[in-house]
Amino acid sequence: MAEAEGYRVPEVCRTIGITYRQLDYWARTGLVTPSIREAGGSGTQRLYSFQDLVVLKVIKKLTDAGVSLQRVRKAIAYLRQSGHEQPTGITLMSDGSSVYACESEDEIIDLVKRGQGVFAIALDKVWEDLSVSLGKRKRDRARAGSRPQALAGAGGA
């Protein structure tokens, strides 16, 4: 689906690697609400922007690493307040309990020097990976739609 139109829930779940229940809970609790269109009753679907997908991917990475949802909420609030349209140069680091936003190499080195084991999420890498992943899916769908009918059927007559 084109970025201008947004991404529907099934594609978001597949792309990010989360369940519908997780996405629904995060939307209902305000962690990540769809910025293009909220669900407006029966028959309407939430539509998420590409930036929403970046935030969702970061949330997924942090929760997979064992960071509590309460701390994830604080990290996401910080990212929203920083006002970066594209999070170039920001690396989130965590020791599993706290989340740190590092915007320079000096901050990263200082955090690592403390001797605590940390993991890092480079936000511009998340952005790039999602761009590639979504672009590949779009190309695959376009190719599948252009297959000859004889190849598209299961079996044959």
Image (spheres, rainbow, N blue to C red):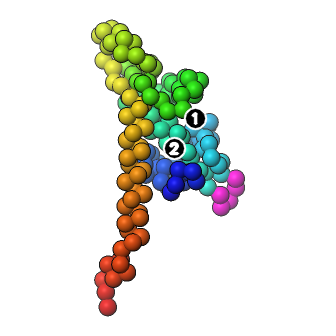
The residue type indicated by label 2 comes to Phe
Residue 128 vs residue 80, the one in the foreground: 128
Q: For the point 65% across and 61% down, which residue is it?
A: 43
Q: Which residues are magenta?
A: 40-44
Query: How many callouts does the rendering have?
Result: 2
Q: Residue at x 35, y 78 (%)?
A: 148
Residue count near mark 1 (Cα–Cα under 10 Å), binned few <14, some 14–19, many ≥20: some
Q: Quadrant of the C terminus?
A: bottom left
Characterize the magenta stretch by its predominant secondary structure. loop
Answer with mark 1 or mark 2, whichever residue precedes in sequence.
Answer: 1
Which disc is residue 15 wearing?
none
Q: Which amino acid type is marked by label 1?
A: Leu
Q: Is residue 68 visible?
A: yes
| Residue holding disc 2 | 50
Percent of width and height locating residue 45: 61, 55
Residue 85 placement, left or right of 88 = right
The disc label shown at residue 31, or none: 1
